[in-house]
Image (cartoon, grey):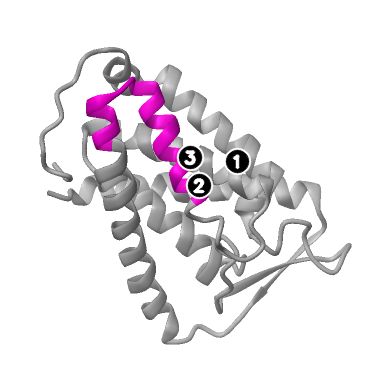
Amino acid sequence: MFHFRGILYGIVLGLIEIFIILLIISSSYKVEVTFNNIGIEILWYIVIFFCVAISEELMSRGFIFQNLYKNSNKHLAILISSLIFSLLHSFNSSFNIFGMINILLIGILLCLLYLKNMNLSIPIGFHFSWNLLQGPILGFSVSGLNTSSIFEIINKRSDDFPFSDFGLEGSLISTIVLGVFVIYFYFFNKDISGKIKGSITISNNGVK
């Protein structure tokens, strides 16, 4: 079953990570934030991105990762499932090397968040928050997908940000921040590190 607390935890974690990335961007570029009208489409985006988060997590973490986790080396399961998750986005517009690396890191992070309580709720919350904040809220592309947005963040020193085509996932800044989060949840979260290093039995159900 999904847990509301886990989904909320994931949403807050995604918000914190996006906020850190924005802080670094605002200190690296001269930015201007404009406010657009809030349209009814924001409700549509909330529904769409929540459904995307559920479907992609069920497939990537609930099926691919879980089956690899049961039948192979645990670290290899994280790496392979995250690589597949990244390559699934290779068909998106403006996919590049930074996009591949960053989505790989996101996949690893989502695997680690899944291992926190062997439940998809936290990854779903993070996935939903990460996509919704990037696109419909802040106006960046979401893995190459453009949406209407409540705010628009503009680079005043240039026509656009160098990562604009693919969004924050195409940014070196995101690579650094995501890398820090992956390191933290792997090495300093005892619940997760213990589960990776120890022996775990996973139920046959895709979602616990």
Residue at 88% x, 62% y: name it: 157
What amino acid type should be assigned to the residue bearing mark 1? Ile
Identify the mark nearer the N-term, 1 or 2: 2
Q: Please determine whether, in this image, residue 134 is positioned above or below residue 203.
A: below
Q: How far, Cα to Cα, is label 3 from label 1?
A: 9 Å
Q: Which residues are magenta?
A: 66-87
Q: Residue furthest right?
A: 157
Residue at 67% x, 46% y: name it: 98
The reply, left or right, for residue 208 in relation to residue 68 is left
Instruction: Check disc 2 and report the residue beneath it.
Output: 86
Assess whether mark 3 and mark 2 are in contact (beta carbons under 8 angstroms): yes
Q: Please determine whether, in this image, residue 90 is positioned above or below residue 179.
A: below
What amino acid type should be assigned to the residue bearing mark 2? Ser
Percent coordinates x, y for residue 56 in the rendering: 34, 55
Q: Which mark is residue 36?
A: none
Corner quadrant of residue 129: bottom left
Q: Residues within 10 Å of mark 3 (few under 14, many from 20)?
A: some
The local secondary structure at tag 3 comes to: helix
Percent coordinates x, y for residue 80 in the rendering: 43, 34
Chief secondary structure of the magenta span?
helix
Q: Please determine whether, in this image, residue 90 is positioned above or below residue 144.
A: above
Q: Residues within 10 Å of mark 2 (few under 14, many from 20)?
A: some
Asked if the stretch drawn in magenta spans residue 13, the answer is: no
Disc 3 versus disc 1: nearer the observer: 3
Instruction: Check disc 1 and report the residue beneath it.
Output: 101
Q: Which mark is residue 83?
A: 3
Count all numbered tags in the image, as a single digit: 3
Assess whether mark 2 and mark 1 are in contact (beta carbons under 8 angstroms): yes
